[in-house]
Image (cartoon, grey):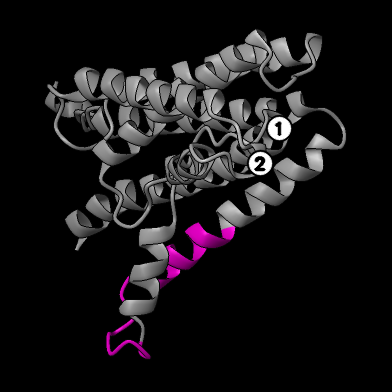
């Protein structure tokens, strides 16, 4: 029983941390779409659809921004994939380092946004888009390596599909309904918060995401160190010395 509880504790923590990152994705995508000329930096499905419509001139949709986001997201995923390839699934020092790097990148982007207002097609804005997409690609690949079921942190389409198909109405038993529903609600809440923060300044949404990501990295890294710490040796009775 004790072993089962110990194995469940990291899994539960990882679930909570990935749900936090799901919320932060909603924030960053709201900032990207509303503040960076209709570009998603986390949800690549949205960019593919935008590009498909833009290729035939649909409503003056952007092409350069979504293209940069797609390429940079894949670059970030490649970086995280190669970094984590030698590691077994689960949290490691490299996981902490990658998520910390994502947080630092977003902090730098927020700083730039506070001194440079984003404009569609502006080189600095496109650079911001690329940096955020690289960071989100790293986050998505890191979450994938952690293998928290039904929580990818960047998309909820498959989560919604599983929630409906495995529900009682779908003939299932409602497996993982709680985490699936939480992921959908959190990305929705994140998008709402991100849109609200845009009324103040686009940098606030990115800064909030940076704080959340660094906090996740620290929490996961601290938990890993505690789990690996050797148990304290029992005290030796004085009379046996």
In front here: 75 or 217? 75
Image quadrant where one finds the N terminus: bottom left
Residue 2 x, y percent position in the rendering: 21, 57
* 135 relative to 187, above or below: above
Identify residue for label 1.
Answer: 205
Q: Residue furthest right?
A: 200
On the rendered structure, is 231 left or right of 157?
left
Q: Camera-side residue: 34 or 92?
A: 34
Residue at 43% in and 39% down: 44
Q: Which label was assigned to residue 8? A: none
Neighbour class for label 2 at 10 Å: few (<14), some, many (≥20)?
many
Q: Position of residue 182 (x, y in %)?
A: 51, 62
Mark 1, residues whose alpha carbon is within 10 Å: few (<14), some, or many (≥20)?
many
Give the number of marks.
2
Q: Residue at x 80, y 16 (%)?
A: 117
Asked if residue 47 lies in the magenta stretch, the reply is: no
User: Which residue range is magenta in the image?
Assistant: 168-185
Image quarter in which the C terminus is found: top left
Q: Name the quadrant containing residue 179.
A: bottom left
**Helix, strand or loop for disc 1:** helix
Residue at 32% in and 32% down? 142
Magenta stretch encompasses residue 171: yes
Residue position marked by numbered label 2 in the rendering: 30
Q: Are marks 2 and 1 in contact (CB under 8 Å)?
A: yes
Callout 2 secondary element: helix
Mark 2 against mark 1, which lies toward the viewer?
2
Residue 104 appears at what percent x and percent y? 54, 14
Residue 123 percent location from the top left of the image:
63, 9
- CA distance separating discs 2 and 1: 9 Å
Q: Residue placed farthest to the front in the image?
A: 56
């Amino acid at each position: 029983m004790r072993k089962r509880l110990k194995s469940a504790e990291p899994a539960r923590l990882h679930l909570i941390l990935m749900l936090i990152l799901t919320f932060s994705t909603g924030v960053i995508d709201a900032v990207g779409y509303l503040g960076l000329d209709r570009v998603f930096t986390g949800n690549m499905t949205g960019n593919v659809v935008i590009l498909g419509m833009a290729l035939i001139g649909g409503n003056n949709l952007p092409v350069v921004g979504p293209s940069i986001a797609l390429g940079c997201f894949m670059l970030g995923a490649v970086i995280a994939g190669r970094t984590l390839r030698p590691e077994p699934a689960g949290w490691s020092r490299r996981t902490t380092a990658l998520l910390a790097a994502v947080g630092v990148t977003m902090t730098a982007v927020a700083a730039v946004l506070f001194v440079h207002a984003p404009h569609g097609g502006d080189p600095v804005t496109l650079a911001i888009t690329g940096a955020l997409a690289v960071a989100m690609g790293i986050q998505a690949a890191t979450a994938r390596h952690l293998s928290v079921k039904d929580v990818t942190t960047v998309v909820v389409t498959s989560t919604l599909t599983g929630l409906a198909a495995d529900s009682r109405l779908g003939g299932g038993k409602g497996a993982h309904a709680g985490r699936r529903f939480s992921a959908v609600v959190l990305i929705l809440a994140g998008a709402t918060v991100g849109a609200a923060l845009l009324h103040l300044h686009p940098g606030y949404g990115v800064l909030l995401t940076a704080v959340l990501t660094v906090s996740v990295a620290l929490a996961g890294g601290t938990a890993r160190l505690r789990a690996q710490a050797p148990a304290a040796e029992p005290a030796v009775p004085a009379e046996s010395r």
